[in-house]
Amino acid sequence: MIKAEPKTILYFIWSYFDVLRELFDTQSQEGIIRKEALSLILERNKRDIKSQLIEYKILRNINDDFELRDVYYKLIEFILFEFRPLLPEEIEKFGTAISELFRHVKEGANADKAILVDRLRALSSQIKEFTDSVEKNSIRLLNESRELKSNVSRLDYREKIQRASFWIQYYILPLNSILDVNHSESITNKLLDVSEFANQKRLTFTDEGIRQSFEKLYFQLIQANDDLLKQSKLLTNELLPLIERIRTESLIITGWIEFLQSYNKIQPPRLLKPKKDNPYSKRVYVNTKEYFEQFKVDEDAIIVEDDQEYETWVFNKSKYKRKLIDSLPIENFFDWCSNQLKQDTNEVTNEKVFALTGLLFEDDLEVKSNTEEKVLNIQTKTSKISVPILNVKKNGIS
Amino acid sequence: MEYPEMHKQIVEELLDGKFILSRERQFEVIKENEEFYTIFFSASFNHELEITNEFARLVSDETDENLSRDISIFFAILCYELDRQGKNFLDALQYSEFSMEEINHSFDNSSWIDLIQSNKQLRDSDTRKRFILSTMGKRNIVDKVTDERFYFTSAYKVFIDYAKELAQSSLNDKQNNQTNDGN
């Protein structure tokens, strides 16, 4: 158990990264950090942090000397992208582990489920470590090949060829065999077998949990295959032809490689930046936008469609008067109105009823209301009108 | 005060950051009036007039660093890939007509693919086309032949010279470090 808070440790790494980087470089070269080397580095950087390095378990004692713990070493290695080249034997060990685990998975597919799940998990982990190792190795070899190509160290031609041959013989060609799909013993081929098996089992295995494990494995293998293909292309395009490539040397290519490796830190060539002079204020756009926003109405405007169709009706007074007189005497005037309107027109409206009501005021008519009777309700298009029962007779005077 | 012919066009184009190429009439005018224009741009804008046998342009502290960096990355990867393919990249830059198809093929299969994909101007075929034909074309660094084909103008030499200087200074640094270590 480490006493310090996780954030304290991370802050420590951030604050003293320069020291850690020097320790990393030392360990990369010597394989160990001698106690004198540690004191020298701390003194040079004027940092008295030995006790914290040990307390936070960043450094580990190896007798009197020290080493960075694996996890910190790997972290710094990854952040700096400076990977140690792996010998082919270190990568091949994954092939052995993968083969063995796969064999057990195939043989024990119908046996104990718990061990099957454990083996699948272990297989997945080995495949992940394998693809990681291949990637790191390719990155390192690519950097070496670029350095040889750029030749900033000004090695003579013979020395360059020697170095290139060294890399090719001990690292590049073996890595190529490991990745070559056409090579029957390559790990890539073994992964294809595992992939086929996993593909089958993810669809046919009886237990659902294990089907899912096979499915996860299958998809991991698809991704791994893509990654390995990418590395293989790199090998073929840039690493295998290394000898050919270093035959020619060019100061310009050297310059470009140096540039691409640290383009963020170098000043590029000067290129004039055209200046735009505007004859108006820089804030014109913002000010105009603000001005118009004052008048913006946020409420939604709703338009109600008026679908009423208006029937044009002109009150023909003489016609209705004649009809009324022909129908006299009428016991219930408004009932008569209502019937007339229903016969002659499409709908009974208030307007029409009121128009006909005007007939009551003609001189030739005598109108009496029967107060004993209840009112009559006339239903018009928009209303219900309650009207009295009216008798209409011819006026006795005329 | 009498100004040389095409003065307005010359001033506009140079201030736009364009390379005025030796095949253009404006170039001759500038050459004939080199002293005048040197003083003119220095006094009026604080810019330095650079004339070679092949082009004229302005340089100044007002530099578009991002654009220059992107163009440099483009040239760097292009030269690297042409060299890797066994071609003479200098000859190619000087004489060859390029197609967007071959550029895309080189870039999409380059070992610098991570860098390419993280660069907004170069990450896919559309942005590359816009960058080369439009952005670089506007400054006369490339000459568009069709929608898919182009030449480089002599402006490429600015970038090649830059790479050479960078290499030289790296070599010098390395030698100095080696001498110091030896002491």
Image: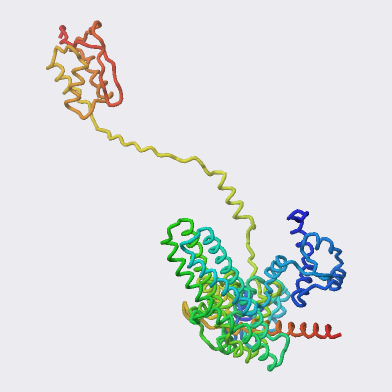
Rendering coords of residue A395 (x, y %) = 17, 9
Q: Quadrant of residue B122?
A: bottom right
Q: Is residue A38 above or below residue A380?
A: below
Q: Is residue B86 above or below residue B70?
A: below
Rendering coords of residue A292 (x, y %) = 56, 48
Q: The C terminus of chain A is located in which quarter?
A: top left
**Visible residue check, residue B32:** no
Q: Residue at x 78, y 65 (%)?
A: A59
Q: Is residue A336 above or below residue B63?
A: above
Of residues A5 and B68, the one nearer the viewer is A5
Q: Quadrant of residue A199?
A: bottom left
Q: Residue at x 87, y 67 (%)?
A: A46
Q: Residue at x 60, y 69 (%)?
A: A129
Does residue B88 appear to the left or right of A325 in the view shown? right
Q: Residue furthest front?
A: A111
Rendering coords of residue B75 (x, y %) = 60, 80
Of residues B142 and A192, the one nearer the viewer is A192
Does residue B46 appear to the left or right of B102 in the view shown? right
Rendering coords of residue B76 (x, y %) = 62, 80
Q: Residue at x 54, y 89 (%)?
A: B95
Q: Is residue B17 above or below residue A158?
A: above
Q: Quadrant of residue A281?
A: bottom right
Number of numbered discs visible in the structure rendering: 0
Q: The N terminus of chain A is located in which quarter?
A: bottom right
